[in-house]
Image: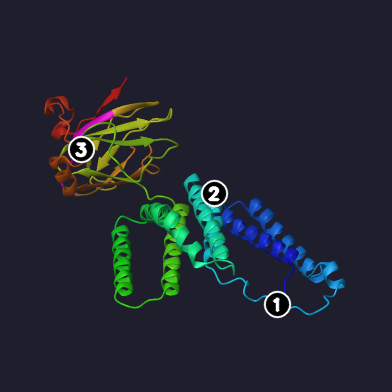
Amino acid sequence: MFNAASKLYFTLAGLAIVVAIGYAVGTGDRVGFTNLAVAGIAAIVIGVAAFAYVPREPLSASLAEPAEPRPADTTDGPRASSWPVFGALALGLVAAGAATEGLLILVGVIVGLVAVFAWFGQTWREHPSWTQAMTDRINDRFVVPIGLPGTIFILAGIGVVALSRLFLSVSVGAAPIIGIVIAFALLGGFWFIANNNVGRSAVTTVATFAVVLVLAGGVAGALKGEREFHHPGGGEGEYTIAAEGIEFDRSDFDLPAASEVTLKFENREAVPHNVAIYEAKGGEPIFQGKILNTVGEADYEFETPEAGSYYFQCDVHPDQMNGTVNVSEEASEEIESGENVTKTSVPGDDERGPENGKGEGSEDE
């Protein structure tokens, strides 16, 4: 049987190791991981020493023998609980939040508080002096009007945050599939519980596993980070791209087919750059924007080609700065219906520069 001192040091060792793993996964910092791991190992060593050399009972209790043997009280022993699992999960969320974003720290604190109070309540309720009348009074005055709705609200919020982190980290095609799988799993689980005599312990176990799984997916998504989003910006009908450090800020972008658009180009360094679109690498040019020799912006107005995949580059640094332009009919339909952005009116063909509407754009002063 472990004594109190050894239990304390073993608990500290476990916390240090959990935090070390979360810190290493989130930051990759070997120094911090090493410090936390060494602290955990030291706590284990001290715990072993405490187990070996510290008496399990106070010295006074071992010297003073009772006049008559007293039966041991077995009614007040600890019972199994799933709340420590949520406590460990809370520590993992706090560690991941310290390495990625503050929102996870808040979620971890909330989960930790819920686990602490729920575990405390379970221990209190299992005491031999507890009566059913006390349970009924707390249920009527706290659990039903406050505790139950609050718990549902907190769990729903945590689930929404966790799933949003998960969906934002996967590809556009995988996100709907994951959502459908989760929805059918929930419906199937609720149907099974409603049509079968499932005990409370089984429901608690399944619910705990589901919550831990959702939170684990959210933490993994937060650590992975959001996928790259390409949003039209700068005004109606405008699309943006920037150059800095001899590279574009994106490797591909989407345009509507056979539409007049404005591509807002920003040169963020005193190095010449432009944006030019070609049928393919080394192919015929579709549009060639004016070169900006220093920091500045230019609005390239041109008509996009038919749907397909095209090649864009900086004509000054074609080997270092290039990518793919995805021209699609779907984007054109969104523009026409007003769901995305609207077409931008542009000058006539005689004002757009080269023939076939291949304008070079104008530099903003």
- Who's the residue at 36% across and 43% down the image? 250
Q: CA distance from mark 2 to mark 1?
A: 48 Å
- Who's the residue at 45% across and 52% down the image? 222
Residue type indicated by callout 2: Ala
User: Quadrant where the C terminus lies?
Assistant: top left
Q: Tell me which corner region of the image, top left, top right, bottom left or bottom right, holds residue 193.
A: bottom left
Q: Residues within 10 Å of mark 3 (few under 14, many from 20)?
A: some
Is label 3 in a helix, a strand or a loop? loop
- Asked if one can make out residue 169 in the rendered structure from this viewpoint, the answer is no
- Who's the residue at 50% across and 51% down the image? 110
Q: Is residue 358 left or right of residue 5?
A: left
The residue labelled by disc 1 is 72
Of the two numbered discs 3 and 1 in the rendering, the one whose residue sits closer to the viewer: 1
Specify the label residue 341 is tagged with: 3
Q: Residues within 10 Å of mark 2 (few under 14, many from 20)?
A: many
- Who's the residue at 74% across and 60% down the image? 42
The residue nearer to you, when weighing 99 against 49, is 49
Is label 1 in a helix, a strand or a loop? loop
Q: Tell me which corner region of the image, top left, top right, bottom left or bottom right, holds residue 51.
A: bottom right
Is label 2 in a helix, a strand or a loop? helix
How far from the left and from the top, in percent, is residue 199? 41, 76
How far from the left and from the top, in percent, is residue 292? 35, 28
Q: Is residue 76 left or right of residue 349?
A: right
Residue type indicated by callout 3: Val
Residue type indicated by callout 1: Ala
Of the two numbered discs 2 and 1 in the rendering, the one whose residue sits closer to the viewer: 1
Specify the label residue 99 is tagged with: 2
